Image: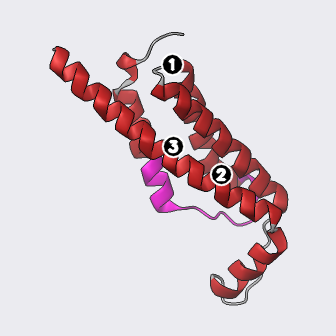
């Protein structure tokens, strides 16, 4: 039983490290998009949408940045095995999946991103018994 919990804890810590990496990368990305909004939109329009103008307001990137900071905070608490981190992480990640549908005229859904979110929520839910109250 002790070995099972030890393996489960290693699995949990590995998932947290991957989430740190993912959230950290997206924090940098959305900060860049927010600071250089006009240039980013020109780049996306030119290379990703074949010249069709994509209208994404800068506040959208600010919201995504904020949600990723909350996700990063949640993961830092999860790494310390705090239950609050679990809830912060889930709320932030589900908000990141839903927010494009609520804020943009067209829904820009990242299917791979949604799948990864579901997998990580599943991993943290599996490891929920390892978490402490405080």
Callout 2 touching callout 1 (CB < 8 Å): no
Q: Is residue 91 left or right of residue 43?
A: left
Q: Quadrant of the C terminus?
A: top right
Please give the name of the residue rendered at 50% of the width and 10% of the height, measured from the top-left corner. Answer: 133
Disc assigned to residue 27: 2
Q: CA distance from mark 2 to mark 1?
A: 23 Å
Q: Quadrant of the N terminus?
A: top left
Quarter of the image for residue 44 reads: bottom right
Frontmost of labels 2 and 1 is 2
In x, y percent, where is residue 5? 24, 20
Quarter of the image for residue 101 reads: bottom right
Frontmost of labels 3 and 1 is 3
> Counting other residues with Cα less than 10 Å from the Cα at mark 2, is it few (<14), some (14-19), or many (20 or more)?
many
Q: Is residue 25 left or right of residue 65?
A: left
In x, y percent, where is residue 49? 66, 83
Mark 2 vs 1, N-terminal side: 2
Q: CA distance from mark 2 to mark 3?
A: 10 Å
- The residue beneath circle 1 is 83
What segment is highlighted magenta in the picture?
102-117
In x, y percent, where is residue 19? 48, 43
Mark 3 vs 1, N-terminal side: 3
Is residue 45 magenta-colored?
no
Identify whether 93 is placed above or below 88.
below
Please give the name of the residue rendered at 16% of the width and 20% of the height, measured from the top-left corner. Answer: 3
Identify whether 52 is placed above or below 33.
below
Callout 2 touching callout 3 (CB < 8 Å): no
Label 2 sits on a secondary structure element that is helix
Q: How many marks do you count on the picture?
A: 3
Q: CA distance from mark 3 to mark 1?
A: 17 Å
Label 3 sits on a secondary structure element that is helix
Label 1 sits on a secondary structure element that is helix
- The residue beneath circle 3 is 20
């Amino acid at each position: 039983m002790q070995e099972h919990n030890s393996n489960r804890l290693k699995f949990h810590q590995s998932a947290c490290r991957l989430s740190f990496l993912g959230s950290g990368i997206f924090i940098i990305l959305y900060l860049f998009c927010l600071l250089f909004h006009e240039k980013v939109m020109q780049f996306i329009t030119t290379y990703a949408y074949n010249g069709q103008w994509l209208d994404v307001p800068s506040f959208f990137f600010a919201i995504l940045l904020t949600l990723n900071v909350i996700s990063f905070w949640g993961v830092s608490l999860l790494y310390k095995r705090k239950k609050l981190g679990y809830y912060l992480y889930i709320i932030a990640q589900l908000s990141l999946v839903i927010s494009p549908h609520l804020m943009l005229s067209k829904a820009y859904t990242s299917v791979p991103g949604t799948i990864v979110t579901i997998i990580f929520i599943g991993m943290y839910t599996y490891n929920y018994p390892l978490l402490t109250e405080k």
